Amino acid sequence: MSASFQEERMLKMMEQLPQNNEEGYNAVIPIVEWEFSQTGDPTKDRRRNIKNAIKALKPVKRWFAVPGWGMLPMLGRTQWKYADGNRCVIDGCDCSTLDYGDLWELYFVDSSTGAIRPFRPWSGVLPGRGTQMSGTYCPQHMQLYHLLTTWVDQEAAESDKGFFKRMKAKGVAFVPVRREQKEESIPLLAKWEQAFAEAKKDGLPIIHYKNPITGENDLTMIVFDNRMLKASSERANTLSGKSYNHIQTETEL
């Protein structure tokens, strides 16, 4: 089932509802309803939220899927209902034109290189659990996933509170020390730092010339190649961008 057919079918079902009887709708955007645990105990609430979030973020299986079947060779399909590159593995919506906002930089951009990369959820939700999917999350499910990772990190930090006690039982002690650090601040370099970061994100070549004697960087240049600028498109927080689709195609191949 193609993403366009799925969206058209969802739109027709939505139009049949009494509250949506007006004409002119041409798209459906998923809204995730979520209730936070509110028992008053922060630890208990966090653990309940983690459990409920993992349950809510589990990808949807096909109705004929059999537990333990990774592939159905005769049909050429997986056990997952929504397994297309730009579709949400939970609600099946086409995420190509949906805006991810700040989540785009967190989950679709490599922090070390600035290159755009596909986000592939895991069948067990948490990284490393199960198999990695060929679909993605819509923005609202991505926001829930972001909250889940935050809660999991907090839970891990809480479990480390007994670290020093366990080390003491092993005869290991830690002594805090203060290190003198002298950082050189150059206001003009700080002013242009964001410009170089943006150039790196857009894939513009940055050339460094090092001093052959000291090994320090003497010259740094951003190369604005007019041919490259004409062939490139502006970065966007959506999956429909040329740069994302190019990376996605290479990944699938």
Image: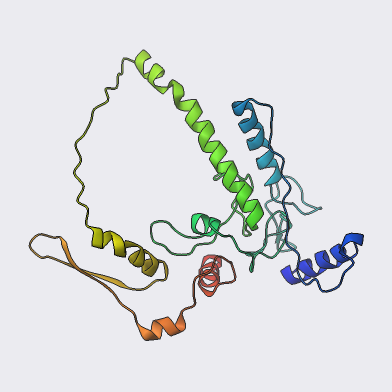
Give x and y (percent) for residue 132.
59, 52
Instruction: Answer whether residue 129 is visible to the viewer in this image.
Output: no
Image height check: is 121 above or below 117? above
Query: What residue sits 66% from the left and 54% below the top?
Result: 140
Please state if 204 lies on the left or on the right of 142 as rendered: left
From the viewer's perspective, is residue 58 above or below residue 139?
Answer: above
Q: How many numbered callouts?
A: 0
Tell me: residue 40, above or below residue 79.
Answer: above
Farthest residue in the left direction?
Answer: 213
Question: Residue 110 versus residue 31: which sits nearer the camera?
Answer: 31
The residue closer to the viewer here, 163 or 230, is: 230
Q: How is the image coloured?
A: rainbow
Residue at left offset 24%, top offset 27%: 177
In the rendering, at what x and y percent does residue 156 appear?
Answer: 50, 32
The residue lying at 51 percent from left, 37 percent from top is 153
Q: Residue 141 location in percent, x, y? A: 65, 52
The single residue placed furthest to the front in the displayed view is 187
Tell me where residue 208 sits by quadrant.
bottom left
* Picture coordinates of residue 7, whole percent (x, y): 77, 67
- Is the N terminus in the top left, top right, bottom left or bottom right quadrant? bottom right
Query: Can residue 174 be seen?
Result: yes
Q: Quadrant of the C terminus?
A: bottom right
